[in-house]
Amino acid sequence: MLALLWTLFFVVYAVLVLFVQGIPIYLAYQMPHPKGPRGPAGPGPAPLVSVVVPARNENLDLGACLDALLAQTYDALEILVVDGGSTDGTRDVAAARAPRVRLLDEPPLPPGWVGKSWALNVGARAAQGEFLLFVDADVRPAPSAVETAVEWARTDGADLVTFASRIEMVGVWENIVLPFYVQMVLTYFRTPRVNRPNSRAAMANGQFLLVRRAAYDEVGGHEAIRNRVLEDVALAQRFRLAGKTLRVGWTPELVTTRMYRTSREMYEGLLKTVSGVRFSAARQVAFAVGLLSFYWLPLAVLPVGLWTGSIWVAGVGAVLWVALFGKHVALTRAVRGSGAYGLLFPVAVGYYLVLVIDALGRGLRGRPVEWKGRSYRLTE
């Protein structure tokens, strides 16, 4: 009787694990996939789009970003680079493309502001466009990216349009960790549901984020979210609460980015994302438990079945192995990575567990997270 109960437990557990594994696959299939403009972007003349690029020591990436922006098929464009006290030649990269690129000096960071939000606020205040397009310096948009975003906004009456980019993954750690990061974002934010009018889901990708200026000002712009590390998500949440229309699409053909260039930069960047600024020990503990319960422990079912001699438990474990490894290979290939790295997803899970434990420890001890040479304290 006891053996039967244990078998039933493992079967129920396996069903739950498979359900959780299926969520990102289901969400991925729901994602809109715009590949370029479908037709006229709307009646009347093309509205001016002000592109704001925050740059702090971005000389390795900024030139390619600006050249891609200057090559856009959308003509009604002004480009503003907000330099945050760079010391590596970033200013020279922007200045070399004047007068088509306008260089702004970021004033000293005021208390209570996160650096990126301050830079975006400075750029937005200087912009003239009916639309504001916030673009990270490490992004390379395809020639039709801006035109596609504006068309989507005008035809759907959207106040916010954001594109999920293809992430360039160079080196072993990027290839192991970043596909899992994409999966976590997709699942946590229920990304495709952002497009539903009655949904409470809200998220945006600050790498490529288009907003109507009138709606941006109405919700308070970046000043209203000045202390939020995940400023893109916070801005989307304000748009959602104000009843605005949001659109998010998966656009690997339109937007490409190299998120991190070193292992340290990747760790600090993902730690910032995992931590946020508002610390919650309960949230971090729940995240760790979820990672263990649905990604590591299922792999132990097969060894348990073999050790106990239970054919049923071993069979359930074998199904879990095939499902988990197969799913991660498929999702890694879907984000344009090598499927072989999907077989190393347990390592990615371990990497995330280290991030969560680090974020939990920093929050409990009052230690800040570091990003771009600036420190941000975690508060309740």
Image (cartoon, rainbow, N blue to C red):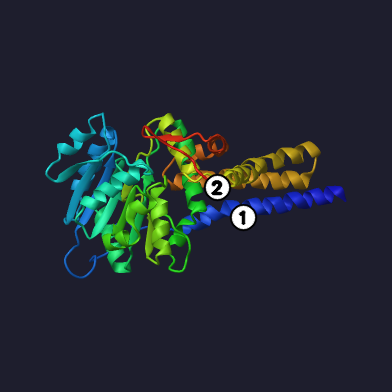
Distance from disc 1 to disc 2, alpha carbons, whole Å, reads 12 Å
Pinpoint residue 252: horizontal percent, then vertical percent: 36, 49
* Earlier sequence position, callout 1 versus callout 2: 1
Q: Residues within 10 Å of mark 2 (few under 14, many from 20)?
A: some
Picture quarter containing residue 38? bottom left
Secondary structure of the residue carrying numbered label 2: helix
In the rendered structure, which amino acid carries the disc numbered 2?
Lys
- Looking at the rendered image, the disc whose residue lies closer to the viewer, 1 or 2, is 1
Question: Closer to the camera, 335 or 293?
Answer: 293
- Residue 131 in the figure: left or right of residue 311: left
Mark 2 highlights which residue?
327
Pinpoint residue 256: horizontal percent, then vertical percent: 33, 45
Secondary structure of the residue carrying numbered label 1: helix
Q: Which mark is residue 60?
A: none
Please name the residue shown 21% across and 51% down the image: 126
In the rendered structure, which amino acid carries the disc numbered 1?
Phe
Pinpoint residue 371: horizontal percent, then vertical percent: 40, 35
Residue 322 drawn above or below residue 30: above
Is residue 181 in sight in this rendering?
yes
Number of numbered discs overlaid on the protein picture: 2
- Residue 149 in the figure: left or right of residue 369: left
Mark 1 highlights which residue?
19
Q: Residue furthest right?
A: 1
